[in-house]
Image: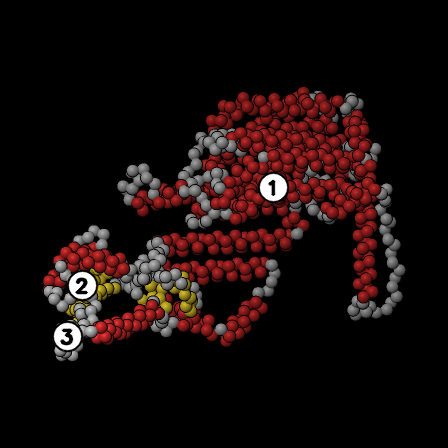
Amino acid sequence: MPITPPSTRAFPLRLRWPIGRWAAPLALLLALLSAVAAPAQTPPAAPTAPAPAPATPAPSTAGPGTANGMMMMMLSEGRDRMAGFRGKLATRLRATPEIPSAIAATLTAQSPTGEPRHFLLTIALSIALMAAGHGAQHLLYERPVARRLLPRPAEPRPGGSALAARFPRLVARALLTLGGMILAALVGFGLATALLPEPTPMTEKTVILAGVGYLLVWAIALFWRLVLPPGAAKGSGMEPAARRLRRDLTVSGAFGVALMSSTVWLEALGMPYDPHAVLVALFGLLTVLATLGALRANRRTVDRAFLAGRAAETVAPLERLTLRLWFPAVAAYFAYAWGTLVNRLILGWPTELPLLLGAYAVAGAILAVYAAVTYATEWLFHQRRILWQPLEDGPDDGQDGTPDGEERAAAAPRTATLDSYEALARRVAGILAAAAGVAVTLSVWNIPRMHGDAADRLIGIMAVCLIGYVAYQGVRIWIDRKIAEEGPAPSTIPGDEGGGHGSASRLATLLPLVRNFILLSIVGAVLLSVLMDLGVNIAPLFAGAGVAGIAIGFGAQTLIRDIFSGAFFLIDDAFRKGEYIEIGSIRGTVEKISVRSMQLRHHRGPLHTVPFGEIHQLTNYSRDWVIMKLPLRITYDTDVEKVRKHIKQLGQALLDDPELGPKFLQPLKSQGVIQMEDSAMILRVKFMTRPGDQWEIRKRVFQELHALFRREGIRFAHREVTVRFAGEATATGPMGEPIGEEARNLAAGAVLHTLGEEALEAEAGAGRRKGAL
């Protein structure tokens, strides 16, 4: 019976994961198909040493023939390796029918009694003794000690996560259960030592493997009980689904532990290599399929647990991508692990079996880091609220039980937008958890040792990107908060004539530009650091940037002029966001300010983009105050003094109005008669108010003046045209006869001509005012 050398069959199994050289999955599939269709082939003999070359000087450059020879050599070497791989694969596959007989022969040969059932009884006895140790620790340790030391379940803080609230209890439960497992192992192995008189080395290995398998199954059950604790989803209606997920994953893990422990046990007993390799590959495949099947059957439950009550549309894009790709990533991990295992089995290299152990290590690292960072974050922010809230709100705040602004923000449902440092800390917790999973995966597969420089560079790049991300989001949140503290964003009512009502402060106008500059600087610094970690020499980049900057400076003088003009306009505080300004023939509200231009929204809707370099004169209608003057046409028989007194009384009444009065800076008053026309006296009234309020006040003033004039009998003057014939003031001819039809037509034509000229002048004036607006 062939036995593999001790160097590859040593016990215990070495838990290391060197990658080594292994065939690609496509090559493995082709080799499987060709091995089934073709007979086995023996590896080719080693090539003989080539004859010594004549002592002639080598050519300075390689010709086409040399390149073709190297290519042919590489192809020949690859063909030889593939032929050897196919031969070994065929050898392993031919041993598949021998698996049952090989197992029986191995158990019979290593059994002290010569019967295979000796080991089966030993395994059953070992499991029974470990179960007895489990029961003993439950009675002596878990019930009287561990349960009393467990902290009470804590309710999640407002806006906090349930995982962070359960974290102290989960950690305490894990540590106390670890103590119980040690106690159960001591009791079980002690009973085995006492009940097995003078065991053989093979019996001892059987007992150890059975006990370790029992502890692994217990650890898997504990792991999923910590991840999905009973009662955690009771209020959300997910408790049955969570219980089913916990049960399926525990059963699949126990199934995998049983299968892979049996292969380790058979290897320790000395089972022949070829059937043992096939058995390991088959049991590994069953383990992978059992785990993936459990995850696939409960995929929706995993998605709901990941969302934690949030809608899928409200999570961040990265979290949404994780939600979509977690199962394909897990399937790819297990496929890679099983393919590596099969490749090593075919080539006869030392095998490493704990596929599930690596997956559990990755999952445990991700969950542990995420829970720890989330718990620390929520604890720190909770302590900050406790310390700073009395100082900020005063001693009387909070007596009515209403939450303050920060607690209301914490109690609000979390969205994908990072609007607070606490939300940023939760995002960083997820990133650190993902980094921990990557680090553990690299450690499990032993990639850092095989490629140390690449791993160090990868870790450096990840650290720089994480620091840059935190700095980027931290600066953005801080500046956005400062902008929010300056007041709400200015709003413009469509259709108003403008005036800049509700303009932003100077700081709120400048901070967005400062924010963009700082964020671009952070992104540039991160890119340069990443390039340096990748080994790129950035000195030529700086030199090239200098030359390019000079060229751009010569070719983009208008751009430079726009940037510098805008900087000086902002320094002079010539305008702010939300103000109504006039630049030449363009008017509008400042809606957006960039580095080189600004956008003005006209009150009728059009959006104008004005480069700063094109501004030669700027008029701001939204600063300090505005005076509105209203002309009134009254008849010549009106008592002007009476009108003045009534307007003064009206101004005082408007000042006493609770809604309109606070908007006046100076009351409504009469300026007297400012012009006299043919058919009317022009009386003007005025008032002073804040920019933007004049339009509302003007509407109310016109309404009140109309009601006042009707009530006091004051008549508005209408336009009149008086036609007089020479020498007469009556509607008769020179001899007293009535005016004829021809004379009436001439008089009507004169009136129409006069009115037409006035209409044309009014239309031209309206056109000029429209163009100005």
Q: What residue type is disc 3 on?
A: Glu
Question: Could you tell me residue 601's position as x and y percent?
Answer: 38, 62
Q: Which mark is residue 327?
A: 1
Q: Are marks 3 and 1 in contact (CB under 8 Å)?
A: no
Q: In what element is the residue under mark 1?
A: helix
Question: Could you tell me residue 176's position as x and y percent?
Answer: 52, 30
Q: Is residue 193 visible?
A: no
Distance from Cα at disc 3 to Cα at disc 1: 111 Å
Q: What residue type is disc 2 on?
A: Phe
Q: Which mark is residue 737?
A: 3
Q: Residue at x 51, y 61 (%)?
A: 524
Give the side of residue 692 with respect to residue 450, left or right.
left
Question: Could you tell me residue 604's position as x and y percent?
Answer: 36, 61
Is 401 drawn above or below residue 204 in the view shown? below
Q: Which residue is mark 2?
A: 716
Q: What residue type is disc 1 on?
A: Phe
Front residue (pair 334, 301): 301
